[in-house]
Amino acid sequence: MNHTETGTGTEPDAAHPPLIWPGEAEELCGKLAAAARGEAFLLHAGSGTPPGAVPRAEHIARQLTVLAQGTVVLSYALGVPVVPVAEIHAPPAEGRTGPARLPDVHRASAMTLNLVRAFGSEVRPEVSWAHELNRAFVANSPERARYEPLTGGIGSALSFLHACGGRPAVLPRPAVSRTALAGDSAPPPADVPGGDRWDPVGHMVWLHHSSAGADHVSAGAVARISNPVGVVVEAETTHDAVLALIDRLDPERSAGRLTFLTRFGADRVTDVLPELVQKVASTEADVVWACDPWHRNRRDPAGVLAEAGAFVALHRTLGTHAGGLHLPPQEGADGRPGALDLVFALATAVTGGRSHSPTTATPNAE
């Protein structure tokens, strides 16, 4: 994509230099394109930082650990690579009220990327490390009998690899995502061939429902960058609004450019999703369909798992791809399933409790 408009006020400066290289965001585009084809699976983790709090190392580490654990389970169960993405949560700067601004996001992203990049090179965790954490989770879970065949299968696969003289693979390094801000403007052109423009703070940029209209200023700013873009779609979002966003944000129909994160609720997903998927397919846009079953089911614990299950089943029926899942920032409590509960429930549903490696069991297997 080539863009020619200039930024107007939130572009990086000497105090807020770019944190990511355009090639990193471009690599994420390629991975999401695979997810759109059903050849990978997006695992997006909500921020582990409590609302209104300043990000701390322990919050970010917990978020990255959950991503690592989920990556091991789902890559085994689905038989495809998992694409982990960590959401950046940026509270307003100290002494100020209102939404976060670029300096707040820049600080949160810098802290997150410091730890994310520590997952590279020599200190990058291995699959066996995350597997041991998963075994401990299952041992204390009320669903232990359902989940133990899955962890047993993963353990057998790791033992086989070790017996063959192989080294357990290291986990993929997560990308980071951020929410588009009301005052966003396009960053200055990056020094890359083609003059593409890239957001310098997050690999992926999200438009939430409050700014999802194609004519909204944030949508205009996001349209001028080449990063992957996520759009939150709720039950009240009209088909016309979604199609207008596709034309605004992905006029070239670039695979991996758009991810639609659905928040329909267990009571609406069956009614809303099929027609929307078909409408989007008619545009020939190669989008990633991901599910956030937490947002509309906060008071209905059973609804969380029900919406996720319906999301996968509907895509199987439609012949399309359930390409991703959003994990909640909090652990399970008061009977509500947490991030790992959903990961294991989805993986168990796909594998049927098998203890061997389900190399053909993708989310859309017939």
Image (cartoon, rainbow, N blue to C red):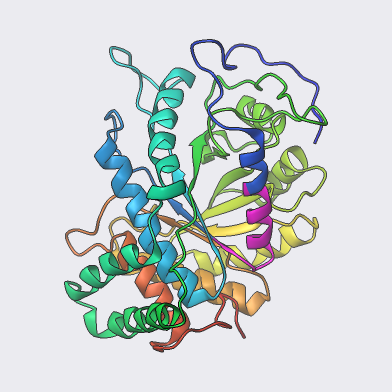
Number of on-image labels: 0
Query: Where is residue 39 shown, x and y percent of the image?
Result: 64, 68
Query: Where is residue 260 shown, x and y percent of the image?
Result: 60, 52
- Residue 68 lies, with reference to residue 118, above or below; the image says below
Q: Is residue 37 magenta?
A: yes
Query: Where is residue 45 shown, x and y percent of the image?
Result: 41, 51
Q: Which of these two is toward me, 149 or 171?
A: 171
Residue occupying the point 46% across, 24% down: 106
Q: Please report the bounds of the magenta region as a residue range.
A: 28-41
Residue occupying the point 73% across, 48% down: 243
Q: Can residue 108 be spotted in the picture?
A: yes
Q: Quadrant of the N terminus?
A: top right
Asked where in the image residue 74 lies, by quadrant, the reply is bottom left
- Residue 71 lies, with reference to residue 251, above or below; the image says below
Direction from residue 162 to residue 275 in the image, left or right:
right
Query: Where is residue 207 shown, x and y percent of the image?
Result: 56, 38
Residue occupying the point 38% across, 87% down: 353
Direction from residue 254 to residue 135 in the image, left or right:
left
Q: Main secondary structure of the magenta part?
A: helix
Q: Which of these two is toward me, 52 or 115?
A: 115
Asked where in the image residue 336 lies, by quadrant, the reply is bottom left
Asked where in the image residue 293 lies, by quadrant, the reply is bottom left
Residue occupying the point 39% across, 47% down: 46
Q: Can residue 120 be spotted in the picture?
A: no
- Residue 345 lies, with reference to residue 178, above or below; the image says below
Direction from residue 226 to residue 330 in the image, left or right:
left
Q: Is residue 329 magenta?
A: no
Q: Quadrant of the C terminus?
A: bottom right
